[in-house]
Image (cartoon, rainbow, N blue to C red):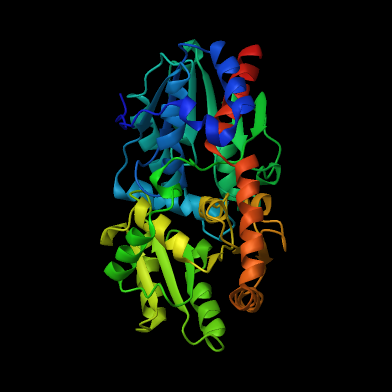
Amino acid sequence: MLPLVPVQPKNIEHYRGVAGDEVIDEILRLAEGLKGARVAHINSTAHGGGVAELLYTLVPLMSSVGLQAEWHIMNGDPDFFTITKLFHNALQGMDIPVTSEMKMKYLSVCGENASDCGQDYDFVIVHDPQPCALFAAMKDRAIRRGKWIWRCHIDSTFAQDDAWEFLVPYINLYDGAVFTMQSFVKSQLEVPCLAFIPPSIDPLSAKNIIPEKRVQSDIARRYGVDETRPIMLQVSRFDPWKDPLGLVDCYREVKRNHRDLQLVYCASMADDDPEGWHYYEKTFNYADGDPDIFLLSNQQGVGNVEVSAFQAMADVVLQKSLREGFGLTVTEAMWKRKPVVAGAVGGILLQVDDGVNGFLIDDIGEAAEKVSMLLDSPATAQRMGEAGHDKVRRNFLSTRHLLDYLRFFHILLRN
């Protein structure tokens, strides 16, 4: 079998106070008709990035309501993950040639993993491009009894034609496909069932429970951040699509009139993202030794508690994305009642209502203007923060995510 990722158990009843009785009761009703069903999630890494974060909650919650849920990761060497990162960028619109050598390596690794993939599941959810061809590589897929679903987490609206057309035949073999937004489907697919399910945050996870003020102060001191001065925060990978250099430019523009401003960038270095260190170095060099710019990551001990603390301390949270599948860090900030200034792209459009719970921006100048306005008007920042918290509670908690999956499972069974 593919390597199994251990997860801590969760109890769906613990979410009743946050999500409400109506949602929990509907989950339990739908789960009753799926009791005992075996579910496998397959992705490329257990650490770093939004997919892993989602699965640490979804998998145990599925088990909590009576399904037998597991999470497996595929095996791959550095060359494979370099190629799939190039695929990832090409699917988000970057002009990258997809060569025959890249395709051969990709299919070879998927084939090797297919030989370790079990057949005794009722539902298999394959996440993102890395393992997409896994299903096609399974020689005996015609006799399998389960339903196979491909889940795309990235914004493929502007996907490069070669990359998209290469993956489409493998996507079309699945029983169903899930995207965050309808616009992410670049061209018509032939899968029997298509669903649009936004991601979610776990309101009871360490990352979404605000640490005590004493803990926040300790964390700030540990990393040299002055909690008494304004903090502008972005939490994301070091990735070209998160525009870290543009973020630094925005900070510099705001700092002209807010001399005590600090920029904190919290990142997670993921196992399947070899490009991350390259963009960390580019950002580090671009910061040019500014003592008020803090580039932090899990390599320095920044985990869920630290991220939550910085989100709680931040005056404004940014997501200066040029492409964004969803942006869980936007959701996390809104849940913590923080105003968000974010790129008007991808799944961010589902979350930020411009002028209500944050601002949508298209360029550095506009971002700097909105950040300055929020720093100058704490009342506006507080009002937007409250509106953001309420929107997340209604739309983007893990209980709603689980409910959507259970509904989709029932649809697949009826088909």
Q: Quadrant of residue 181?
A: top right
**Camera-side residue: 306 or 151?**
306
Query: Could one spot residue 315 in this view of the protein?
Result: yes
Q: Is residue 137 visible in this depiction of the protein? A: no
Expressed as whole percent of the image width and height from the top left, the position of residue 228 reads 42, 76
Q: Quadrant of residue 291?
A: bottom left
Q: Position of residue 237 (x, y in %)?
A: 43, 59
Whether residue 261 sits left or right of residue 400 in the image: it is left
Above or below, 208 against 238 in this view is above
Location of the N terminus (image quadrant): top left
* Vertical order, 169 against 78 (above or below): above
Residue in the foreground of this view, choosing between 73 and 370: 370
Left or right: 395 with respect to 123? right
Residue 177 drawn at (x, y percent): 60, 31
Who is closer to the viewer here, 107 or 238? 238
Count the numbered circles shown: 0
Check the image and report above or below for 137 versus 92: above
Q: Dividing the picture into quarters, in which one does residue 38 lie? A: top left
**Residue at position x 53%, y 56% in the image:** 333
> Residue at position x 62%, y 78% from top?
376
Where residue 382 sits: x, y (%)?
62, 63
- What quarter of the picture does the C terminus occupy? top right
